[in-house]
Image (tube, rainbow, N blue to C red):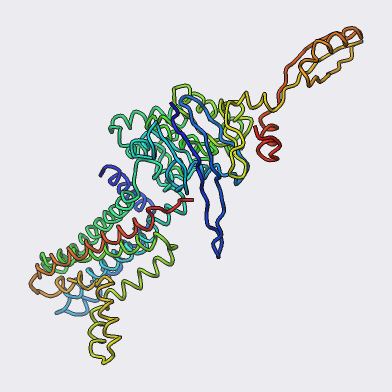
């Protein structure tokens, strides 16, 4: 059973002095599966954050059907199973790290004080912030805020975590560390739904992809299948007289014929590699240029 | 149902304390009380009355300033800093959020009144004045007024910026204290329209003079218990009405 099902989600805003209706989401359909990291990709203004806010009840859709854990609508029981990390760390700066986690633990209702205390301490150790537990959040760096924000989203052991740009603005170490934490979270059975502009990270950790372009869904499905569909080619690495040559074969049915041909020509075959486009290239082709609706 | 309200209230309380807003209020009130002692010493017979008058005025102004200026940022700050998003993504409804914020500021008001009263009592003891229960009733009126002012600030902050909210609240604070005088003055005029407008204002706007028992702290009048009960009901009705109205404003508001 899908953790969340989105059917025909539409949202528009009125903007300007003389209000003019702007369609932001145009009939989205997708599911979020348990224990899977689903990447939510799209250019700036594609509607990613609006969709996430619709899922969290922060923005009210014009129409559409949202089902959470098999039940229609965002009930209090459903909210208890959801964690959220916003795009920028909008947190209470007057709190220390440990107070911050305890506060959000108290808001989750289903935890006792002892459980909140234990869980806060465990999470601070897990995100490597135990040393800064008594420092005010206003003294935290961006990376530290993202980490404590993720801990906040996980404090009540949610079944779904919604992460809006979790790795934005982080250094490579921070991005790697946070990506690993996200993978760990999913491996424990939690559904992770994350938006990101860091496509290398997304390619590494996302098993499913939902791609938006100007509020429309352009892809929804398996990440590796998507990359395969966007084009696979083979690279043949050859050597003759100490000189290396790389040949590209676009049609896989040509491989045998091409191998025979180069060997007849006296080349030594060093490697035959299957190559597919990177997520970055596929995203640019589908998400931005609208080259192909998959 | 009450646990999240309490958690938000405790967080609001902590936020205001740590933002050091209270330091300014405390300094102002202490200055006012210092002046009361200084002025009181100029007059032998009226010394205690002057001290009591300045003390209760200090507490009254402190609570009014806190309720209006901090109250005006209770919701707007959450919206501007977007901290409301992580809060409302939790199993918390928007009315629980509003009540939690209001309770947090009320707790601050109680602490301010308590602290300043203690200082006032020390001044009274120093001056050889016997504090009475009437002083407590006048403080209770100050707190009730603070609750209504905070309700007004909450209501306006549902759709306006903090500066607009503060301006509206200061205006309503002044009108709220002059309503009786306005009503009396225009009652004497011949114009029917003005009469209906001023009468209408007394129904539409909160009459803050109903919480003014500050003379009790100065003169040995009997405590008007009936008025205290009726004004308590009046103040709480206004407060819950304003919180409900604020809830209606933000109930379906998109948080961007």
Seen in the picture, residue B64 relative to B199 is either above or below; the reply is: above
Figure quadrant of residue A79: top left
User: How many marks on residues?
Assistant: 0
Which percent across, then down, holds residue A277? 71, 27
**Relative horizontal placement of residue B94, taking residue A222 as reference (left or right):** left
Which percent across, then down, holds residue B115? 24, 58
Name the one closer to the observer, A31 or A263: A31
Seen in the picture, residue B79 relative to B35 is either above or below; the reply is: above
Which residue lies most toward the left here? B222
Q: Name the residue located 86 percent from the left edge and 12 percent from the top edge.
A: A239
Name the one closer to the observer, A175 or B26: A175
Which percent across, then down, holds residue A144? 50, 36
Which percent across, then down, holds residue B32? 29, 69
Seen in the picture, residue A76 relative to B236 is either above or below; the reply is: above
Name the one closer to the observer, A97 or B250: B250
Q: Is residue A260 visible?
A: yes
Figure quadrant of residue B21: bottom left
Q: Name the residue located 48 percent from the left edge and 27 percent from the top edge.
A: A33
Q: Is residue B27 visible?
A: no
Quarter of the figure that contains the N terminus of chain B: top left
**Relative horizontal placement of residue A189, taking residue B111 as reference (left or right):** right
Which residue lies most toward the bottom here? B190
Q: Name the residue located 53 percent from the left edge and 40 percent from the top edge.
A: A28
Q: Name the residue located 12 percent from the left edge and 75 percent from the top edge.
A: B219
């Amino acid at each position: 059973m899908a953790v969340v099902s989105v059917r025909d989600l539409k949202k528009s805003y009125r903007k300007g002095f003389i209000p003019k209706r702007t369609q932001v989401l145009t009939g989205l359909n997708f599911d979020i599966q348990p224990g899977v990291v689903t990447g939510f990709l799209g250019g700036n203004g594609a509607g990613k954050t609006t969709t996430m806010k619709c899922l969290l009840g922060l923005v009210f859709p014009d129409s559409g059907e949202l089902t959470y854990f098999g039940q229609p609508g965002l009930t209090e029981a459903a909210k208890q199973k959801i964690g959220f990390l916003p795009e920028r760390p909008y947190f209470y700066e007057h709190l220390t790290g440990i107070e911050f986690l305890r506060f959000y633990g108290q808001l989750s209702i289903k935890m006792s004080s002892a459980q909140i205390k234990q869980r806060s301490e465990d999470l601070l150790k897990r995100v490597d912030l135990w040393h800064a537990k008594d420092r005010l959040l206003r003294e935290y760096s961006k990376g530290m805020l993202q980490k404590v924000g993720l801990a906040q989203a996980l404090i009540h052991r949610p079944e779904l975590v919604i992460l809006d740009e979790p790795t934005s603005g982080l250094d490579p170490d921070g991005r790697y560390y946070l990506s690993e934490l996200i993978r760990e979270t999913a491996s424990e059975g939690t559904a992770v739904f994350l938006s990101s502009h860091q496509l290398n990270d997304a390619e590494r950790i996302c098993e499913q992809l939902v791609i938006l372009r100007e509020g429309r869904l352009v892809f929804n499905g398996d990440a590796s299948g998507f990359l395969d569909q966007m084009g696979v080619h083979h690279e043949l690495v050859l050597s003759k007289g100490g000189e290396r040559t790389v040949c590209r074969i676009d049609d896989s049915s040509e491989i045998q014929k091409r191998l025979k041909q180069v060997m007849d020509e006296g080349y030594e075959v060093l490697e035959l590699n299957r190559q597919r486009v990177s997520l970055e290239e596929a995203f640019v082709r589908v998400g931005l240029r609208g080259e192909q609706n998959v | 149902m009450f646990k999240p309200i309490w958690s938000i209230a405790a967080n609001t309380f902590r936020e205001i304390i740590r933002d050091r807003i209270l330091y300014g209020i405390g300094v102002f009130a202490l200055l006012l009380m210092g002046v009361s002692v200084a002025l009181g010493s100029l007059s032998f017979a009226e010394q205690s009355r002057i001290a009591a008058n300045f003390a209760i005025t200090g507490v009254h102004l402190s609570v009014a300033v806190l309720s209006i200026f901090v109250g005006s940022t209770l919701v707007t700050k959450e919206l501007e800093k977007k901290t409301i998003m992580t809060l409302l993504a939790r199993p918390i409804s928007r009315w629980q959020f509003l009540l939690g914020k209001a309770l947090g500021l009320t707790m601050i008001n109680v602490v301010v009144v308590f602290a300043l009263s203690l200082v006032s009592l020390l001044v009274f003891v120093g001056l050889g004045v016997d504090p009475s229960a009437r002083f407590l009733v006048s403080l209770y009126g100050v707190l009730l007024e603070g609750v209504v002012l905070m309700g007004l600030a909450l209501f306006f902050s549902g759709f306006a910026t903090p500066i607009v909210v503060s301006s509206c609240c200061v205006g309503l604070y002044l009108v709220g204290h002059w309503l009786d005088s306005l009503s009396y003055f225009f009652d004497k005029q011949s114009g029917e329209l003005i009469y209906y407008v001023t009468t209408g204002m007394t129904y539409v706007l909160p009459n803050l003079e109903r919480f003014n028992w500050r003379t009790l702290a100065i003169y040995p009048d009997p405590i008007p218990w009936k008025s205290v009960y009726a004004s308590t009901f009046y103040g709480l009705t206004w407060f819950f009405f304003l919180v409900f109205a604020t809830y209606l404003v933000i109930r379906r508001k998109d948080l961007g």
